[in-house]
Amino acid sequence: MSRRPSGYTLLELLVALAVFAVVITAAYAGVVQFLRTAQRLEAEARRDAEIQFAVDLFAQELAQAVARPVRDALGRREAALQLQGAQLLFTRTGWPAPPGQARTDLRRVLYRHDHGQWLRGEHAAPDRIDAAPPSTSVLLGGLDAWHLRCLTRDGQWLEHWPPRGSDEASAQLPLAIEAVFEFTDRGSVRRLLTLVSTWPGPGS
């Protein structure tokens, strides 16, 4: 009676190699897919954090807005808060002077939308002695549009501020501002922000 030779035949080795190759290929594809998913989730989390930071900064600064009119470089009176189209300009407090230095704690802050970018600018002093533009930086990219409207004290929503024909409102703030942000990759984000001025009022 003949005995089968010990070991594997060439055909068995080829089959084993083929099975091993299929397993390795599937495992590699799984690892690649996992890494791609992890990278996508990390990028989305980073983007969400950027949006959250920018919107929170905007909300915090608006919370420190004060009803304090300002003067431009020509001495003309400007409203404490101005909303014109995609641009919001207001006076805010909360910038203490360094020890030993006499400096106002007020800033004139500008937010505007321009070509997909959300820009923030500021003047170091609310009343300007020259016509120099504010120092401006890009706060966030990928913003398709933003829409603002102001709530008046009699319950009306206006897409501009101060109300037309009202000089008294130049020293007032709206009760609230509704901001709708439209992002390329995140859809719409809506925030309703209440304004409470601590400024004593005109003439202070």
Image (cartoon, rainbow, N blue to C red):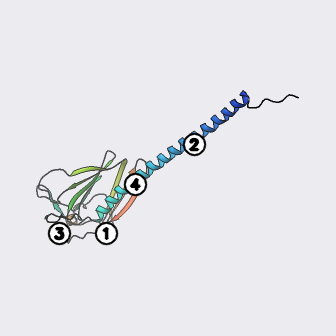
Task: Give the foreground label among 3 and 4.
Answer: 4
Give whichever of discs 2 and 1 has the lower sequence position. 2
Residue 27's quadrant in the figure? top right
Disc number placed over residue 49 in the picture, else none: 4
C-alpha separation, residue under disc 3 versus residue under disc 4: 39 Å
Give the amino acid type for the residue marked by disc 1 in the picture: Asp
Q: Secondary structure at mark 2?
A: helix
Q: Is residue 149 visible?
A: no
Give whichever of discs 1 and 4 has the lower sequence position. 4
Asked whether, in this view, residue 85 is left or right of residue 46, the answer is left
Looking at the rendered image, the quarter that the C terminus falls into is: bottom left
Q: Which residue is mark 1?
A: 154
| Location of residue 89 in the rendering, given as x and y in whole percent from the top left corner | 24, 57
Give whichever of discs 3 and 4 has the lower sequence position. 4
Callout 4 crowding tier (Cα within 10 Å): few <14, some 14–19, many ≥20? few
Q: Is residue 191 visible?
A: yes
C-alpha separation, residue under disc 1 versus residue under disc 4: 36 Å
| Location of residue 152 in the rendering, given as x and y in whole percent from the top left corner | 30, 66
| Location of residue 196 in the rendering, given as x and y in whole percent from the top left corner | 29, 69
Disc number placed over residue 30 in the picture, else none: 2
Callout 2 crowding tier (Cα within 10 Å): few <14, some 14–19, many ≥20? few
In the rendered image, the residue lying farthest to the bottom is 200
Q: Which residue is mark 3?
A: 202
Task: Give the foreground label among 2 and 3.
Answer: 2
Give whichever of discs 2 and 4 has the lower sequence position. 2
